[in-house]
Image (spheres, grey):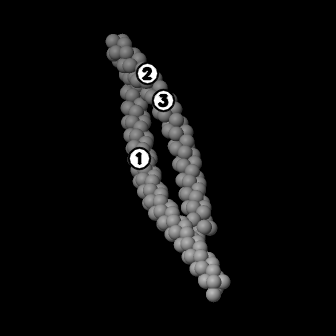
Amino acid sequence: MSKVLPNLVMVFAFLLCGLCLYQWNREVALHKEMAAMSEDLYKKKENIQGLELNLRRASDEISRLEQVRKDLIQTKMTNEATIASLTNEVERLIRQKDAVTAQLEQYKKALDTANESIVKQNEDIKRQNEMLQSIARQRDEKIAELAKVVEEYNKLVKDYNKLVEDVNRMNEQAAAAAAAAEKKK
């Protein structure tokens, strides 16, 4: 009985260690995944900044070309071919801007999806931590109950030993009394 309790405590300790190792391993994997996502997000943001710079340049170019077009209208009909080519370039830049805007929306959706996944994972971790705390409380209650039973058992053994000593003492006294009675006869 004296070896069962320590062995039981050791088993629980090893189980808890294993559970901790499992959680740490999973946390490391999640942190690596977060780092990869963060790096990917950084690259995408950098790409977006480059595209926004190109967009600003294109917007500035459009403004400049509009001014050129006004100047050319004032100089009359000699430059109509140039105006047509500039109009085509403006349309191409608008299409490019629309494509960049659509790509930006896709990036935003991907980021939202990743954030939702992380929130769900955090909720799962919180739920698992609560379960671990509940299991630990139950374990502590069982250990307290076992300690109480062991304490009662020890008290019972102590009372039994005292009773045996009392009986032995009484037997010795009876034997001494019988021996004294024998001597008197």
| Foreground of the two, 154 or 115 | 154
Q: Do the residues labelled 3 and 2 touch (CB within 8 Å)?
A: no
Q: Mark 2 points at which residue?
A: 61
How far apart in space, not on screen, are marks 3 and 1 (Cα)? 27 Å
- According to the image, label 3 marks what residue? 49
Q: Nearer the viewer, mark 3 or mark 1?
A: 1
Q: How crowded is mark 2: few (under 14 residues within 10 Å), some or many (20 or more)?
A: some
Q: Which mark is residue 119?
A: 1
- Give left or right: position of 174 versus 144: right
Residue 102 can be seen, yes or no? no
Secondary structure at numbered mark 3: helix
What kind of residue is marked 1? Answer: Val
Give me the residue at 49% from left, 34% from top.
Answer: 45
The residue most toward the bottom is 185
Q: Which residue is drawn at 43% across and 24% down?
A: 56
49 vs 25: above or below? above
Is tag 3's residue or tag 2's residue first in the polypeptide sequence?
3
Looking at the rendered image, the disc whose residue lies closer to the viewer, 3 or 2, is 3
Q: In what element is the residue under mark 2?
A: helix
Which residue is drawn at the image coordinates 43% and 50% (left, top)?
Answer: 126
Left or right of residue 162: residue 56: left
Q: Where is residue 80 in the image (x, y as percent from the top left)?
A: 37, 22
Mark 1 element type: helix
Query: Where does residue 168 sit, x and y in percent of width and height?
Result: 60, 76
Q: Do the residues labelled 3 and 1 touch (CB within 8 Å)?
A: no
- Taking the view exactly as shown, the residue that stands out farthest to the front is 185
